[in-house]
Amino acid sequence: MTVEKRLNIAIVGAGPGGLAAFIHFRRLPNVDLSVFDAAKELKEVGAGIGLNENTWRHLQLMGVADQIEQYTDRADGTAIDVENRNGTTGKLISRKYQSADPNLPAKSRIERYKLQNALLSGVPRDQIQLNKRLINLEETDGGVILYFKDGTSGGPFDLVIGADGIRSVVRSYAFPDHKLTYTGKLAYRILVPQENFAHIERIPQGSCFWHTKLTHVYTKPLDNGLFEIATRALVPDIDGTKVSWGHEVSKEEVGYCDTIRQILDVPDRWLEFALFGGPRLHSVIHGGRIALLGDASHPLSGAFGAGAAFAFEDAYVLAQAIAHIQKTGDSVGTALQLYDDIRGPHYEKLYHVLDGFADIAKEVEASSPEIDDNEFIEEIVQKGLHGDTKWIYTYDERLGQIDPAQGEAIQSIAAIPKAVSPAA
């Protein structure tokens, strides 16, 4: 009788992507999992997070959607999905309503910690090793060994999954020439009780982007009577001290246009997030035993507001690729190549979209050099809305994820089941 070889797999990082990988890989046979996180306790930093169709799809696949459903309201066709406004004049540029299609999942925005808790409900927490800050990796004939700041080590592992965020140590090891740079922008986010805004008239009840020529403010009433504000500012890093996540600052350090100053004056404090990004990785795998997922694989600085969904897609596809080679008897390296062949083109398309956004501004400036700021804002917003970006939030294979000419294995692994609505 043949005994199948067990795979020893390490997941570095217990954020949304790492937890999603944990959930999917626990379902595979003959797998031993180790999960490491640098934090002393698992807690989510941030404000709100959007739940789009692809997010719901994966929450359902992981069996944790019911933990989120209680916080959502089904659309009746009158609920505003998103507005775009001129941040200087307040003028409405565009408005879109949520779909009332009962066959589609709810599209909503909730507090980030609720997503974190939903994912944690699907894993045994005692299997997550905390306070394990990775400092180095070593590839040996027997597998990959991990070394931690506390002096301990783990492995050797047949597969190491780097889900350790935009400042990924795993990525730095696998691709030492890949460098992050500060984008020159800071994001400020905060959640405040909605009652604190009762004195301000005509606040949009859906997601609203208030645009200026160089940046924007985002506002959205959330569940449980909370109100989210997020704004970006152009701030040079003169002394090189910017950090990347969740630094608390006073309200005096946050500046924006006078038109929405009433909203921005309400919070007494903000969470500051320095935005870092990097060039596209041309591969998200290394050495046949290392794979990157989530922000570690695509340092996009939160450009699409769907980072959790992208990480969920990565985790699902990687687990499917490993399940495939368990059936065929192929190597882990073969599974990683399948994963790379699927996710690499996806992120290439995302970077092309970002390039397109930048090109729109250049095109408007070149074609209308005398245009005033308000006309400039309206034109670039309208041009940006006309782009085909639906595939980003639905993972629609017809719009670019799966090449029909690719092999049957790739098409099978890449095909993620559609989300369904409990109301359907």
Image: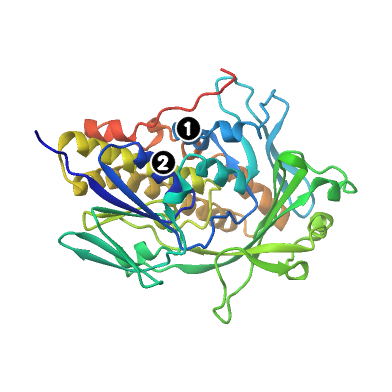
Picture coordinates of residue 211, whole percent (x, y): 69, 52
Question: Vertical placement of 203 versus 73: above or below?
Answer: below
Q: Looking at the image, how many numbered discs can be counted on the residues?
A: 2
Picture coordinates of residue 177, whole percent (x, y): 32, 70
Decide which of 82, 333 is in the foreground and name it: 333
Give the crowd class for mark 1: few <14, some 14-19, many >=20 residues within 10 Å: some
User: Which mark is on residue 63?
Assistant: 1
Q: Do we see residue 175 in this rendering?
A: no
Picture coordinates of residue 372, whole percent (x, y): 71, 57
Left or right of 35? Residue 247 is right
User: Which amino acid, by three-letter code, is at mark 1?
Assistant: Gly
Q: Residue furthest bottom?
A: 239
Give the crowd class for mark 2: few <14, some 14-19, many >=20 residues within 10 Å: many
Look at the numbered discs 2 and 1 and tell me whether their residues touch, using CB distance below 8 Å: yes
Give the structural element (helix, strand or loop) at label 1: loop
Q: Earlier in the sequence, mark 2 or mark 1?
A: 2
Residue sitting at 52 percent across and 63 percent down? 40
Image quarter in which the C terminus is found: top right
Residue sitting at 68 percent across and 29 percent down? 73
Picture coordinates of residue 145, whole percent (x, y): 26, 63
Question: Vertical placement of 42 versus 329: above or below?
Answer: below
User: Which mark is on residue 23?
Assistant: 2
Question: Vertical placement of 143 versus 77: above or below?
Answer: below
Question: Vertical placement of 129 versus 321: above or below?
Answer: below
Q: Residue furthest left?
A: 1
Left or right of 241? Residue 404 is left
